[in-house]
Amino acid sequence: MTESSAPSRPFRSFLFATAILVLQAICLAVVWAMHLQASGNFHEVIKGELYRSAQPDGAQLADWAQKHGFRSVLNLRGASDGTWYAEEIATSQRLGLEHADFGMSAGKPLSQERADQLIALMRRLPKPLLIHCKQGADRTGLASALYLATKGAGEDEAEGQISFRYGHVGLPLTAAWPMDQSWEALEPSLGFES
């Protein structure tokens, strides 16, 4: 490389600084993801009314139910033969919690009809209500956004439930992109412009 074609010192410094910033951002994202995993991705959506999480084990469900007074649990993963499901059902029964299943996939758009069914179910279930999916990021994010919208929250507040804050990565070609597409398609029925 000749002297005239070599990148200038300021440009090399800029590239180095940019690389450091990108590396720091990646490290922060990894630390945040680890925090969400360790905490069960548990969050209050509406105090005393709606909470969201990743798949809880029996001990987490019992602890959270005791602390927040849950009266019901909504599983967005659908009924299953897995041990996680048997534990969730047994813990719900032991604690006297109403349990409901609403199977949906983070990888498939939620139709208007299914969204209406989900909203009706969330309204019907006794409060406080815990909703969860496997990671508590994608399906749970969309359900939380729908619930907030039906309770009169603004578009930004509701849509904020489907965000990286909760572990959702809303980028085209990602596995959970259909949750973002669903939200955009459902916005007009919620009174928002899409």
Image: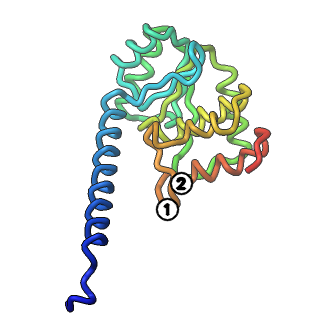
Looking at the picture, which amino acid does disc 1 mark? Leu
- Tell me: 19 left or right of 92: left
Residue 109 spot, x, y in % from top left: 61, 51
Picture quarter with the N terminus: bottom left
Marker count (numbered): 2
Quarter holding residue 90: top left
Quarter holding residue 36: top left
Query: Which of the colour schemes (rainbow, by chain, secondary structure, one colour) is used?
Result: rainbow
Residue 156 spot, x, y in % from top left: 64, 38
Looking at the picture, which amino acid does disc 2 mark? Trp
User: Image point 29% across, 59% down: which residue?
Assistant: 17
Mark 2 lies on a secondary structure that is helix
User: Image point 26% across, 64% down: which residue?
Assistant: 16
The answer to the question of whether label 1 and label 2 lie on touching residues, with beta carbons closer than 8 A, is yes
Residue 81 spot, x, y in % from top left: 41, 35
Q: For the residue carrying disc 2, how many other residues have a C-alpha within 10 Å: few (<14), some (14-19), or many (20+)? A: some
User: Image point 50% across, 56% down: which residue?
Assistant: 171
Q: For the residue carrying disc 1, how many other residues have a C-alpha within 10 Å: few (<14), some (14-19), or many (20+)? A: few
The vertical placement of 164 against 41, above or below, is below
- Tell me: 170 left or right of 58: right
Give residue 88's mark.
none
- Tell me: 47 left or right of 53: right
Give residue 177's mark.
2
User: Image point 47% across, 25% down: which residue?
Assistant: 43
Residue 170 spot, x, y in % from top left: 51, 51
Q: CA distance from mark 1 to mark 2?
A: 7 Å
Nearer to the camera, 121 or 87: 121
Nearer to the camera, 147 or 91: 147
Mark 1 lies on a secondary structure that is loop
Q: Which residue is mark 1?
A: 173
Nearer to the camera, 26 or 152: 26
